[in-house]
Every structure is written in C-alpha cells, then in structure tokens.
Image (cartoon, rainbow, N blue to C red):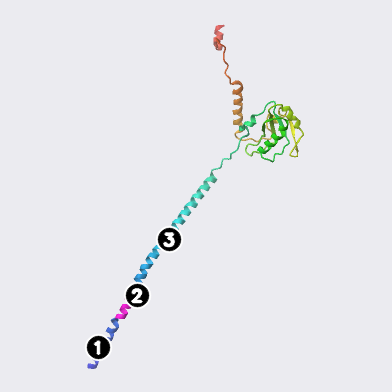
Amino acid sequence: MDSKREMKKRNESDIGAISTPSPLVTRKKGKKRKNRKESDGDEIPALNKKVDQIGNCLNELTGIVKKLNKNSEMSSKEKEIPKKVEYECLFENEDSDMGNGQTIFVRGFDCSFPIDDIKSTLTKHFSSCGEVWRVFLPYECKTGSPLGFGFVNMIRDAHKGLALNGTYLGGMRLQVTMAIDRTEYYGFTNFSGCERCGRALNKRRMKRFQENFGRRITPPPGAVFKTPKQNDEAK
C-alpha cells in the first residue's frame, strides 16, 4: 500500500516537472518573442517603403500610358484632317501681268533648275543688250514646274534683245522673238492651272477695266442731263 502511494507521488512529481517549464526555457521563449517583435518592427517600414516605390512606379506608368494615348489621338486626328497644300497660283503672281507690245518671248533654256535661278540667268544673259526690267516664267500652280518658256521686259530698246536669238545659254540654243507674235502670249498651252486661276483672272480683268474705263466723266459747266422720256416730251 505504501509502495503504491510512493509510486503515485513520483508520477505526479514527474508530471509536474514536465508540465512546469524551467526558468531557462521561459527566458529563451521570451527572448524569441522579443526578437520576433523587433524584426517585425523593422520589416514594416521596409514594406511601406517598397509599397511607396511600387505606387510611384504605377503612377509613372499611368502617366506614360496617358501620354501615349494622347499622342495616338492627335496623330489619328491629323490623319483624318487633310493638310492644306500651300502653293502660289500663277495668275496671283503680279509678274504674270507684265505683258505689253515690247515684251520679248524666249524659250530653249534649261528648265531643270529652280525658277529663281533661271530668272537670274536670263536676266544676266539679256543684260548684254540693255537693262532688264522684269523676267517672268510661267509655271504650274500646284507643282511650280516651269512651262518651258518665258517673257522678258527691257527698260528700253527691246528690239536689241532679239539679237540673242540663236545664242546659247548653258549649252542650249535659245529662241528669242517678240511675244505678240507667239500664241503663248495670249494663252498658255499645256497648262493645267488650279481652282484659283479663274477667280484671279476675273479680278485682274476687273482691275484693268477700272483703270481704263473707271474714271469719272466730269460734265462741262451748265450741262443738263435729261432722261430719254424728258427728251421725247421736249419734242
């Protein structure tokens, strides 16, 4: 009986020893918890920093996407709206109205150069016969390509310029004659023109009419103007 009680006490003491942690174990567990809390405290700011970085990257990407969308919209609008092609209508050029009875016609020059260069070359060539006032080279409105002939106005002694007929300019033989003897003087052949040509020509004709016939006729002193009806009644 006594032996049984002793055995029971031993078992209870062993169980108590097992269930009750030692102070050393308790201290170790406390340290681990403390270290874990400290590490958690260090990780939170780092995570917040990473979250902020990711947010900044997303904002940058969003801005880039918006910019790309805006550029694509602008390019699509530019494609939809046709660009206006700027050009100078031939008959809007004041030089095209330079013709008169003393104008010289010339053809045979090299048309592969820019118009301004050709005009300068012709001016220099005709200057050997006198002072040149103006050189005009007809061209296609939309392309600016010369039609292959031109007109020259001399300040005086235009007939002297006819001496250049048959001369060479840049290795090409020139044909020089009075413009009034050429059909090109009255109308350009092989000329396509543009939508503004008709309006420009009408404007020019109106200007000429006003210059020639638009002056007011001043009646003499004491003159009385009557209508046809008044004239009939007077009879």
Find disc 3 in the rendering and name its residue: 53
Tell me where residue 177 appears, x and y as whole percent.
74, 30
What percent of the width, then of the height, locates residue 157? Answer: 72, 26
Q: Earlier in the sequence, mark 1 or mark 3?
A: 1
Name the mark nearer the viewer: 2 or 1.
Answer: 2
Residue placed under numbered mark 1 in the picture: 9
Q: Given the current orientation, which residue lies at the most extreme top position? A: 235
Q: Are marks 3 and 2 in contact (CB under 8 Å)?
A: no
Q: CA distance from mark 1 to mark 3?
A: 65 Å
- At a point 28% along the width and 84% down the height, the residue shown is 17
The residue stretch that appears in magenta: 23-35
- Tell me the crowding category of disc 2: few under 14, some 14 to 19, or many 20 or more residues within 10 angstroms, Cα based: few
Q: Position of residue 37 (x, y in %)?
A: 34, 70
Question: Does residue 215 appear to the left or right of 158 in the view shown?
Answer: left
Q: Is residue 72 left or right of residue 112?
A: left
Split into 4 quadrants, where in the image is the N terminus? bottom left
Under tag 2, what secondary structure? helix
Closest to the camera, between mark 1 and mark 3, is 3
The secondary structure making up most of the magenta span is helix
How far apart marks 2 and 1 lie (CA) works out to 35 Å
Q: Secondary structure at mark 1?
A: helix
Q: Amino acid at mark 3?
A: Gln
Q: Amino acid at mark 2?
A: Lys
Badge number at residue 32: 2
**Residue 208 shows in this picture:** yes
Q: CA distance from mark 3 to mark 2?
A: 31 Å
User: SS of the residue at dot 3?
Assistant: helix
The quarter of the image holding the C terminus is top right
| Res 176 → quadrant | top right
Q: Residue furthest right?
A: 166
Residue farthest along the left direction in this orientation: 2
